[in-house]
Image (spheres, rainbow, N blue to C red):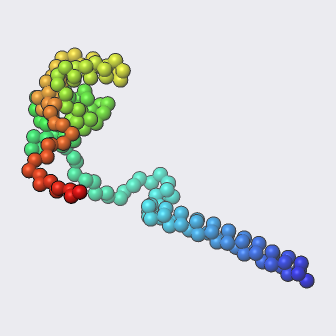
Amino acid sequence: MKEQNHGKLKRDFQGLYRKLIVASVVVAIGGIALIYFNVDPNLSAFKGDEPDTEIVDMPVEVDFDKIENGIHLRTGFIDAPGMTETIQNCTNCHSSKLVIQNRMNAERWKSTIKWMQETQNLWELGENETVIINYLVTNYPPKKVGRRAALTDVEWYQLKE
């Protein structure tokens, strides 16, 4: 009798397990369909080769070379002679922020450019090298700041022994 009950219980569990798997698959397919229809409510994938006639509001064209308050908006460079050459030769390979944060004197910029040419495949800059170095040294000179400013006017708490 126990074996019969055990066999029936096992069959009932297997049936319930199959129903659970089928329900999970149905829910998953329904979820995918719901996401797809929300992302593409017009079912454009099913339209074939019909041209899209829907009018889309496009944002106003952004002027990437706009300068406000003396700062080139796209790069953050200061608007000054040599900025264009610096943008054209430096931001092809890395962010303008990398250039701005590395404040160096002319000698160090020259050695950095030479290092980039020898190891990073930077092209010959020709006459632009002097223009770029002058721009960087003039607008982003080295700062002589230590780790932090010295503490002044501090009232120290005296520890008691």
Q: Can residue 66 be seen in this view?
A: no
54 in relation to 92, above or below: below
Left or right: 96 with respect to 12? left
Give the image quarter of residue 16: bottom right
**Quarter of the view holding residue 130:** top left
* Residue drawn 85% across the image and 81% down it: 5
* Residue at point 15%, 43% (across, down): 149
Give how far across and how far down residue 155 sits, in percent.
11, 54
Tell which residue pokes out farthest to the bottom in this image.
Answer: 1
- The front one of 25 and 51 is 25
Residue 26: % across, % down: 62, 69
The residue that appears at 11% across and 29% down in the rendered structure is: 138
Which of the image's four quarters has the N terminus?
bottom right
Q: Position of residue 34 (x, y in %)?
A: 50, 67
Residue 8's place in the image compared with 62, above or below, is: below
Foreground of the two, 154 or 128: 154
Q: In which quarter of the image is residue 17?
A: bottom right
